[in-house]
Image (tube, grey):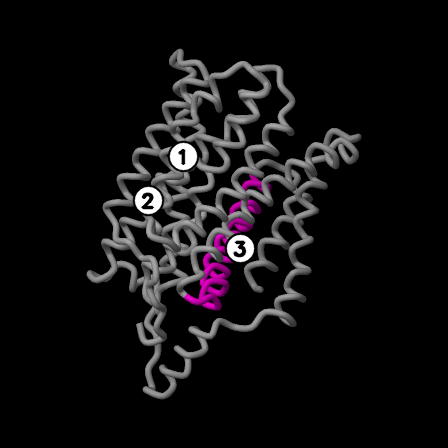
Amino acid sequence: MFSILWYSLFSFLGGFSTSYGMLFAIRGLFGIGMGGVWAAGMPLTLEHWPAHLRGTASGLMQSGYSMGFLLSSLVFEFGYPLVNQDADMGWRVMLWIGIVPAFLVLFIMKGVEESPIWLERQRHLKEHKQRDSLSLVRLFKPDLLMTTLHTSILMGALLFMYHSITYWYPTLLTQMHRPTLPFLAALNIGAIVGGIVCGRMSEGRLGRRGAATIATLIGILSVPLYVFTTSTTLLWIGALTMGFFGAGNFGIVPGYLTERFPTAARAVGAGFAYHVGAGLGSFTPTLVGMLQDRGLPLPTAMAACIAGSGAMVILMLWLGPETRGRQFHATD
């Protein structure tokens, strides 16, 4: 609840910025809450679910990202022109809208119970007169160090692939003289459904690694339809396919990350890995731009980055353990 209130407040305040430096600082503060709500919300959600359904819950949870992307595209397409009558007003209204999630706190207060694993752990610590050490330090102790490094690099590869797919895509569509919204809608609808399907598949014999590997591999194979075709119909199919598989591989991420860390460090471990990965992946748009500056057409630059990062995702998945069915214990 604190994280939601934090990022809602700083989104709202960002709309009052009077300089680039002020906006930069406020967006940095906004990011603290945005990262915190993912790290806290993921175990809160998944610790309520039994192990055999955690993959489905993981896919449902992660599909919310693509749902948000789609909703923001619709708001920008239809809402932004209505408020952009003044050249300095449209972007401010977009940031002011960020106050809306604060109202979710009222729902969480009344309708969401605390994690049963967390409650059990608090009882266990109280009974044994113990207290948890600072969990961030725990990530770098010998028994968790390799897990922390592996999950961070894996998330870097996954987010590198995701940004390769999405960041320059509207620019590519504009270069093709296509409207952006229909293809962004296809991409994100595919990602919503694909994330849920991938998460569900990860509960079966394929496991987390197998389901994500198949999705990633098909995403790589769909690159020609996604960036090289000139047919509107094929381009739309390519967007839907890439979303379903190339972005749908994220369906395993919440479940996999929470299963890699013990209860005492689950939230901070998953949150740390995800956001270190986000930091590593944030270089992707710059790299695609640099490749264009050196003469590569945008479709080729995107294709190379999608394929390269996808191969890295598959490699990192199989360098780590399978986690399907792993039980959560309050004493971990």
Residue at the top extreme of this rendering: 295
Query: Does the magenta portion include 47?
Result: yes
Distance between the alpha carbons at the discs numbered 3 and 1? 25 Å
Residue under circle 3? 33
Task: Please tell me which residue is depicted at 49% across the width and 55% down the height of the picture.
Answer: 38
Say if 140 sits above or below 84 in the image.
below
Distance between the alpha carbons at the discs numbered 1 and 2? 11 Å
Q: Is residue 293 left or right of residue 181?
A: left
Q: Earlier in the sequence, mark 3 or mark 2?
A: 3
Task: Please tell me which residue is depicted at 63% across the width and 54% down the height of the picture.
Answer: 8
Residue type at numbered disc 3: Gly
Q: Is residue 55 left or right of residue 234?
A: left
Residue type at numbered disc 1: Met
Say if 43 sits above or below 187 in the image.
below
Query: Does the magenta portion include 195?
Result: no
Residue under circle 2? 154
Residue under circle 1? 161
In front: label 3 or label 2:
2
